[in-house]
Amino acid sequence: MASSTIKVQGLDQLLKNLEQLPRELVSKNGGLVRTALFKATKRIREQARQRAPHDTGVLAKNIIAVRDKNPRANGASERYIITVRKKRWSKQAKERATRRANGKIDYRRSNDAYYWRWVEFGTATQQAQPFLRPAFESEKEAAVLDFKDSLASGIKRVVAKMRK
């Protein structure tokens, strides 16, 4: 699976500096950096939803931004992943799912976008219709600017609050 990354230099130093600031600026869960990063990923997520095929609408609805629970394992301080939601099928859910005459689950009515990889990367018989990669490529610069603006406004807001 293809992976694209934008490396922003100086974030480690920024986080060290933020950790020295009062608790209003930094929290255990990422603080302002986490909020700013999520705002930046929303732009890319929305662009991917617009680019996704809308045959049934299931694929577009299932494009999500997920916070990595352990970003330090990948050498990051905060990390969001834009992906397609995976539906987990419990035994009870399988029993309740719509079934065909032969007893197999009809995944087309399940709101499960299990087929997204085939759409994004194509198959031997189907041409690729990428929607995640082009969304990232078209919005990456704007997302970095959103991150910067959100972080700056968050710092200003907290500093103004501390002055009161």
Image (cartoon, grey):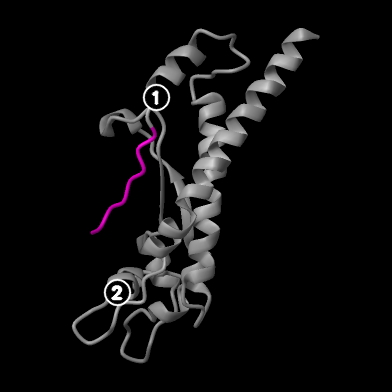
Q: Position of residue 109 (x, y in %)?
A: 47, 79
User: Considering depth in this image, is 113 or 117 the residue closer to the camera?
Assistant: 117
Amino acid type of disc 2?
Answer: Trp
Q: Which mark is residue 39?
A: none
What's under tag 1, amino acid-wise?
Gly
Q: Nearer the viewer, residue 35 or 70?
A: 35
What's the residue at 50%, 7% (across, down)? 20
Name the residue carrying label 2: 118
Residue 41 in sight from this viewpoint? no
Q: SS of the residue at dot 2?
A: helix
Question: Magenta segment, principal secondary structure?
Answer: loop
Q: Nearer the viewer, mark 2 or mark 1?
A: 1
Q: Is residue 24 magenta?
A: no
Neighbour tally class for label 2: few under 14, some 14-19, many 20 plus, Cα within 10 Å: some
Q: Is residue 84 above or below residue 148?
A: below
Look at the image and give the residue range highlighted in magenta. 1-8
Q: List the residue tagged with mark 1.
A: 10
Q: Is residue 138 above or below residue 79?
A: below
Q: Earlier in the sequence, mark 2 or mark 1?
A: 1
Magenta-drawn stretch contains 2: yes
Question: Total number of numbered labels?
Answer: 2
- Identify the image quadrant of the N terminus: bottom left
Q: Secondary structure at mark 1?
A: loop
Among all residues in the image, which is located at the extreme left? 124
Name the spot of residue 114 as percent of width and height, x first. 35, 69
Could you tell whether 164 is left or right of 120 in the image?
right
Residue 151 can be seen, yes or no: yes
Residue sitting at x 71%, y 23%:
157
Side (left or right) of 85 relative to 74: right
